[in-house]
Amino acid sequence: MKKIAVEIKWGIVFFAVIILWTVFEKLMGWHDVNIEQHRIYSSFFALPAIAIYVLALIDKRKRDYGNKMTWVQGFMTGLIIAVIVAILSPLGQLLTHEYLSPEYFSNVIAYVVKTGEMNQVDAEAYFNLKSYIIMSIKGAIMMGVLTSAVVALFVRKK
């Protein structure tokens, strides 16, 4: 555990920021009255997500690698963080949809049906806790791999 202490710390930080972002989305009305804006503005979460990976890899480089880091070391650090985020993501989805924004699924289903984007059956199949848990795990891994690969290029240091 000591070998991945930095990754665990930043995985938890990432998880906390996801929860804070969700609260921000809720306060902005993107889960109810302004739900049509959710798709657009939720993508801005990429900015703090990338910043967290940059800070995490720099932290790892300084603490564990004597301020030197290869691309592979940075990439592996990011992958471990992504796995930790993926492990925590079902808890995040549960907190979001059971406590922070329990009306989100019914609101988004009503919105996509009203706008004709989906029919009721397809919307209910897509917008539910099980579906979002699966998507959040896959998303954490996929985006973690991509972000780790790119950030490691910039954080590596000989």
Image (cartoon, rainbow, N blue to C red):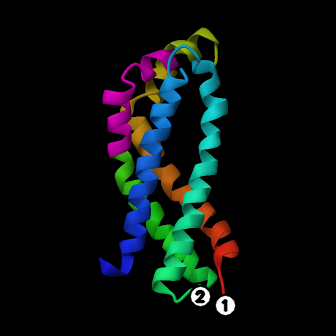
In terms of sequence position, does the residue under pointer 2 or pointer 1 come before the other?
Answer: 2
Question: Can you give x and y, in whole percent of width and height, for residue 54 in the image?
Answer: 60, 65
Question: Can you give x and y, in whole percent of width and height, for residue 147 in the image?
Answer: 61, 61
Measured Cα–Cα span from mark 2 to mark 1: 5 Å
Q: For the residue carrying disc 2, how many other residues have a C-alpha within 10 Å: few (<14), some (14-19), or many (20+)?
A: some
Secondary structure predominantly adopted by residues drawn in magenta: helix
User: For mark 2, what is the residue?
Assistant: 68
What's drawn in magenta, residue-wise? 91-109
119 over 156 or under it: above or below: above
Which residue does the image show at 55% across and 72% down from the upper left?
57
Question: Can you give x and y, in whole percent of width and height, for residue 13 in the image?
Answer: 43, 56
Q: Using the image as rendered, state which of residue 150 and residue 126 is in the foreground.
A: 150
User: For mark 1, what is the residue?
Assistant: 158
Position of the N terminus, as image quadrant, is bottom left
| Mark 2 touches mark 1? (CB < 8 Å) | yes
Circle 2: residue type: Lys
The circle drawn on residue 42 is none
